[in-house]
Amino acid sequence: MDMILTIFKSLGVDQTVFIQFVILIIIFTLVSNLLFSKLKEVLIMREMKTTKLESSAHAIYKKADELAEQYKAKVEKTHQESHQANQNKKNEINIVEKDKLKNAEQEFTKDYEAKKNKILEEISIQKTSLLSRVDELSGNLVEKLTK
């Protein structure tokens, strides 16, 4: 203990150190109540505006990802529905066009058969007329050959 007193005396510390220490504690308490409480409020508010918002930002990002997935699903569903509707319409048009083609083909076949029969009748008529004139024509041919 004597050694500590010797060190204090060499530093010029006397009995007023205790009073100074008490005054320092009183001043620290007053300053901490006035300044540090306000600083603490500012730090808490700053933390709420930065790190506390981070969790809400993660929630918003998560919700945005969910909405993006829903959007993609709806777009895909709409694409599938439009493709199916397009395919159905295409099939309906193909059926109608096949019917039209079949009807046109039947009409052309009837027309072809009618014209074919008409031409065959004309050939048959000309054939009969030529056959009826065979004797006359053969007689003419024999006359011309003999002359």
Image: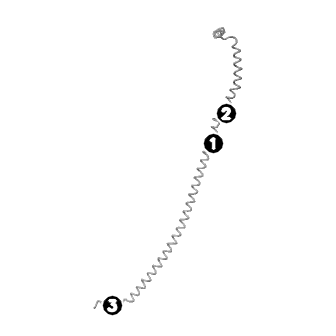
Q: Earlier in the sequence, mark 3 or mark 2?
A: 2
Q: Quadrant of the N terminus?
A: top right
The Cα–Cα distance between marks 3 and 2, rounded to whole angstroms, is 133 Å
- The residue to which callout 2 is attached is 45
Residue that mark 1 sits on = 60
Report the residue at 57% width, 57% height from top: 82
Tell me where residue 128 appears, x and y as whole percent. Answer: 41, 87
Q: How many numbered marks appear?
A: 3
Between disc 1 and disc 3, whose residue precedes? 1
Give the colouring mode of the picture: one colour
Q: Nearer the viewer, mark 3 or mark 2?
A: 2
Identify the element where label 2 is drawn. helix
Q: Which mark is residue 140?
A: 3
Residue 126 % position (x, y): 41, 85
Q: Secondary structure at mark 3?
A: helix
Lateral position of residue 5 relative to residue 97, left or right: right
The one nearer the camera, 63 or 37, is: 37
Label 1 sits on a secondary structure element that is helix
How many C-alpha atoms fall within 10 Å of the one at disc 1: few (<14), some, or many (≥20)?
Answer: few
Residue type, numbered disc 3: Asn
Compare residues 16 and 123 and report the one nearer the observer: 16
Q: Tell me residue 64's x, y (percent).
A: 61, 45
